[in-house]
Image (cartoon, helix red, strand yellow):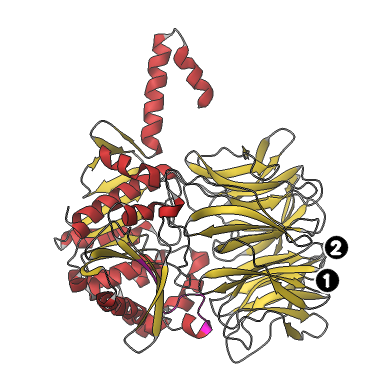
Amino acid sequence: MYPYLLCLFSKNSIMKFFLILFLFFFIIKAGFTQNNEFVIPGDNLIVEGIPQIPASLAGELEKYTQSKSAVFSGWHPEKIEMIMSTRFGNTSQLGYLKEPLSDPVQITFFDEPVRSARFDPVSGEFFLFYKDTGGDEFSQIYRYDFADRNFKMLTKGGREQNGNIIWLGKSNTFAYTSTRRNGADRDIYIMNALDPGSDSLFMELKGGGWGILDCTDDGNTLLLREYVSNALSYYYLADVTTGTLTELSQKSDVEIYYSGAVFNKEQNGIYFITDIDHEFRTLAYMDLSDLSIEYISDNTSGDVEDFDLSEDGKSLAYIINESGTSILCIYDTASGFSKRIEDLPVGIYGSLSFHNNSKDLAMTITSARSSRDIYVYNVNSDQIIQWTNSEMGGIDPEELSIPELIKWKSFDGLEISGFYYKPHPKFTGKRPVIIDIHGGPASQSRPGFIGSYNYYLNELGIGIIFPNVRGSAGFGKTFLKLDDGYDRLNSVKDIGALLDHINTIPGLDPERIMVMGGSYGGYMSLAVSVDYADKIRCAVDVVGISNFNTFLKNTESYRTDLRRVEYGDERDPDMYAFLEKISPLNNADKITKPLLIVQGGNDPRVPRSEAEQMMNTIKSLGGEVWYLEAKDEGHGFAKKSNADFQRFVTVMFVKKYLLGI
């Protein structure tokens, strides 16, 4: 729309009138606007039970909503240049970096977020990227050509999820997965990126958990993974010429987890992550001639969670998660020796990627006092170069709370832990608490940058605890399974134990506690509101499950079987009855404290029906419920205008019901 702004300077008053009218409605549609008194929601937002938001609140939060992050996306195949993603305006888009700390040149301009790119493997003349519509996660594959700066959609569109792009050697042909055939199974397709008409179905597969991990240099063999659950997966080789599928996974009486994997340089083995014979996920090597396994990493207290192999096959970089903080190691494939890289910033690492020169390793790093930024480590010189310096808005990093690891015993004696961000020391007396529960369920709260949450710490004096209840990742495979099936409520009891433990934390007020969370954390917030209503002041449910049976019925079909492994198979009468019994929707009469529900209208994971039925039930019972839905969002709010409005609503809810102001 920016060229049309020139028309505002036209002498044609009619044109100016309609242009101003158009811009006004564009802003309204984008999320919200404001007058001198109130923040006004756009027509993309559904707002029920929420009072008008004072315009002054937007000013209070301004400096806490302007920070940005930078995430590595892809190296140019020849030049020491990269594509990254950051927020440009209202959404995350792709930018191009030619050198460290230069200003990124924006190369995608969409209303919807674009976060990843796959350079062509030869010359870097184009790249592929994904984009969905309104957060529906039905991602389509696009090609961007540098020559004319145009893009073209390569896949067919519609309600299909496309992803897992892997180049077939050094060519323009790639393999990818898609749910196109029936919406439930994730098959493999092959296409020449320069000829969308070449798109063809290569292999039909059963189940929604299939992914492509790597391809041999000759383009003839794909390495596949079938994900069944957080504890069980399998590896396969797929012959591109014959369509033959060969299983590599070990058969065992116990569940074995296989994660990322790549072929070695000689193509006669694979490096991979697994928990075979280990409590924690470990880096290993498999000889493809006899399927024998050699373990590489020495991690006994945390998972190996990411790795990348250099183009020459000599260096293998991997990350170990130690108590939530990342450790980078470099493994020399010839000598078998690993070394820890000591001089990187302390934080959480991700997006590991070697350049084709086999020396420069890109990664993304974040910490409690810094948003995500891109760093490059040179394995030959040991030099570390920062490539981006993300804006922090008006936040002073030195004023940000450094989280403290806290631990407590649950009802059965199991030790549970979490990270406690203390309120600013200028606040005295016992301070209120927000407990924020992660989703997944197999995710992990880690000591990273919490963005606008710093407003609660610095301006309202509220402490925040991010717990890792049983079922969280990062604590070993035994801990991971402790909330499966009929043990679901034990994780809720872990929060019950935390509510009691807050009595023992100096400076915190056990009489003023709010619980909140997103996705599975949203379910947990509802469940805590049911079981511990007498110990909390209020709760926030963001895209949470309100009834497991209706959730399993309505979530997208490519996810159903994967979720049944975690939550239980509702087709079994006993499990169906159990899920009905524990679902917050069927216990809504016990929710006696105010509730804020936030939902994306296009959410394919936890559909809007979960939020809507919870809201309607609470209202019918005479309870206090605020409801916010964005019609152009999915599993969480990705557009800044919508996310800002959600922040305004949440802060107002916190002030009224947690603080009583």
| 382 sits left or right of 443 in the view | right
Tell which of 429 and 214 is nearer to you. Answer: 429
Please give the residue where the numbered disc 1 appears in the rendered image. Answer: 267
Please give the residue where the numbered disc 2 appears in the rendered image. Answer: 218
Q: Is residue 530 visible?
A: yes
Most common secondary structure along the magenta stretch: loop
- Quick one: SS at disc 1? loop
At label 1, counting other C-alpha atoms closer than 10 Å, the crowd grade (few under 14, some 14-19, many 20 or more) is: some
Report the residue at 27% width, 77% height from top: 504
**Cβ–Cβ below 8 Å for labels 1 and 2?**
yes
Tell which of 426 and 166 is nearer to you. Answer: 426
Please determine whether, in this image, residue 141 is positioned above or below residue 524: above
Report the residue at 20% width, 46% height from top: 51
From which residue to which does the magenta span run?
465-477
The x and y percentages for residue 654 are 25, 56
Please determine whether, in this image, residue 320 is positioned above or below residue 152: below
Amino acid at the residue labelled 2: Asp
Amino acid at the residue labelled 1: Gln
Please determine whether, in this image, residue 499 is positioned above or below residue 145: below
